[in-house]
Image (cartoon, helix red, strand yellow):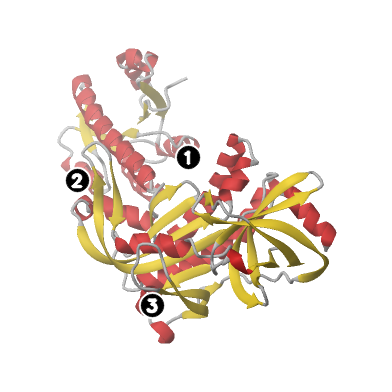
Amino acid sequence: MPDPEALKILFVDDEPDLVPLIRQKFRSQVRSGELALVFAADGVEALDQLEADPDIDIVVTDINMPRMDGLTLLGRLGELGRPTKAVVVTAYGDMENIRTAMNRGAFDFLTKPIDMADLDVTLGQARGAVEREREAERVRRTITRYLSDKIANAVLSNPDAVQASERREVSVLMSDIAGFSQVAERLEPERVVELLNVYLGAMTEVVDEHDGAIDEFIGDAVLAIFGAPLEMADHAARAVACAVAMQARMGDVNADLAERGLPALEMTAAVNSGEVVVGTIGSETRAKYGVVGSPVNLTARIQSLAVPGEVLISDATYAAAGGADGPLRLDGTRRVSLKGFAEPVAVHSVAAVEGAGAVPADESSLRDLADPLPFRLATLDGKRLAADAHDGALVALAETGARARVAAQAEVEPRTDVCLSLDLPGGTVDVYAKVTEVEDVGDGQALGLRFSSVPPEAAEAFAARS
């Protein structure tokens, strides 16, 4: 069986003596797997061979043959859209046919009787052309794993455009799986990889559809750029539309995960816009096309505030997308203090993008609990739990969240990540949530919670309380 990368040549000629001659000439290359030979007696038979075998790289065809001549075959090759290299064989000095053949896309020509040395040279040149195209296709496939086809083609057609760093106004999108660390702890490593491949595959498709460039995957997080390497006047609106579409796609992702016996996921997303430096970052041996600047850090900070299922954007993104006159429809605005930023930042929750859809609504409703469910609450700073814990109780439950009471000394802030430790019959179980609302009530605080990770044991206990 020939090597998959062997050069496959189809010889088309109605002279029966040619077949043994060619077999004899290339027998060592065929045995070594370097070449694979196929034969046809005329153009009709050649088209049948080409249709049956997509791996034929070179066609060497005579011109004068019964049923279908070589020039007609050349025309049909062009219609097939195949990258096959064609070499025509014609009588010595037949310039009219040679001109016609070259105009129809022939790679080269040979004159009869065929000189085997000339054939060797011509096939070597054709092989070089085939291998260059194979390598270009490998590069294209590699790049399109990270960039959309449109962006990849722009990069391949003008490589210098992405080499030099430059300042550019862009929008940066960051998304993350809510409670991923807790989900990953409950699965085998292979299942974690399977889950990530389903999720990241779907998100990549959405980013591609909106002409974004994926800068990198950071574990379960996606960092995408809009406005580079392709310039976009509407980068802000396009990035937000992409984030909304990513949230909408989560229904399909979870349906796929359910079929595989994997847990459902929820996602948080944020978009920020501003001037960054874009270009090739790294060394001579290892580099990537990326983005650097304060707007990237701000995107990450805003994303950390989002509750599962939400899309948050900065004021800069809202303004760049046209503000109140643009296509973005908001679901609320608040000013927040962020680590590393001196002044409070206005953050908007997106409800919809005109012409691009809406963020799926959370339709679960709270049910008051006749018997409140006690817990110990600790706040999180990144992945670290605070040392202090405070008593509290869940007073109302929904599928996606809860209402709780804690002591005033807990001093919980909106958009804080918290861990609720519940004592259940099977032992202590930790539930993770984002605080959506805080209200001072009497000697305590009333908290609105949106769950980010609920272990199966806690989900069963919640269902039993409903």
In the rendered view, does 379 fall on the left or right side of 97?
right
Callout 2 crowding tier (Cα within 10 Å): few <14, some 14–19, many ≥20 = few
What's the residue type where badge 2 is placed? Arg
Picture mark count:
3
Q: Nearer the viewer, mark 2 or mark 3?
A: 3
Find numbered disc 3 in the image and state the secondary structure of the residue it sits on: loop
Q: Nearer the viewer, residue 152 or 313?
A: 313
Q: Secondary structure at mark 2?
A: helix
Q: Pick out the residue farthest to the bottom.
A: 325
Residue 401 drawn at (x, y percent): 68, 65
- Does residue 149 lie above or below 349 as drawn? above
Give the position of the C terminus as an image quadrant: bottom right
- For label 1, count other residues whose C-alpha is less than 10 Å away and answer few (under 14), some (14-19) or many (20+): few
Where is mark 3, residue-wise? 321
Residue at 39% x, 36% y is 66
Q: Nearer the viewer, residue 211 or 181?
A: 181
Q: Amino acid at mark 3?
A: Ala
User: In whole angstroms, how far apart are the C-alphas of marks 2 and 3?
Assistant: 56 Å
C-beta proximity under 8 Å, tags 1 and 3: no
Query: Of label 2 and label 1, which has the lower sequence position?
Result: 1
Mark 2 or mark 3, earlier in chain = 2
Q: Residue beneath label 1, please?
A: 51
Residue position marked by numbered label 2 in the rendering? 99
Q: Which of the 4 image quarters holds residue 165?
A: bottom left
Tag 3: Cα neighbours inside 10 Å, few (<14), some, or many (≥20)?
many
Q: Residue at x 41, y 55 (%)?
A: 223
- Check disc 1 and give the amino acid type: Glu
The residue sitting at 60% across, 73% down in the picture is: 438
User: Quadrant of the rendered structure where residue 29 is?
Assistant: top left
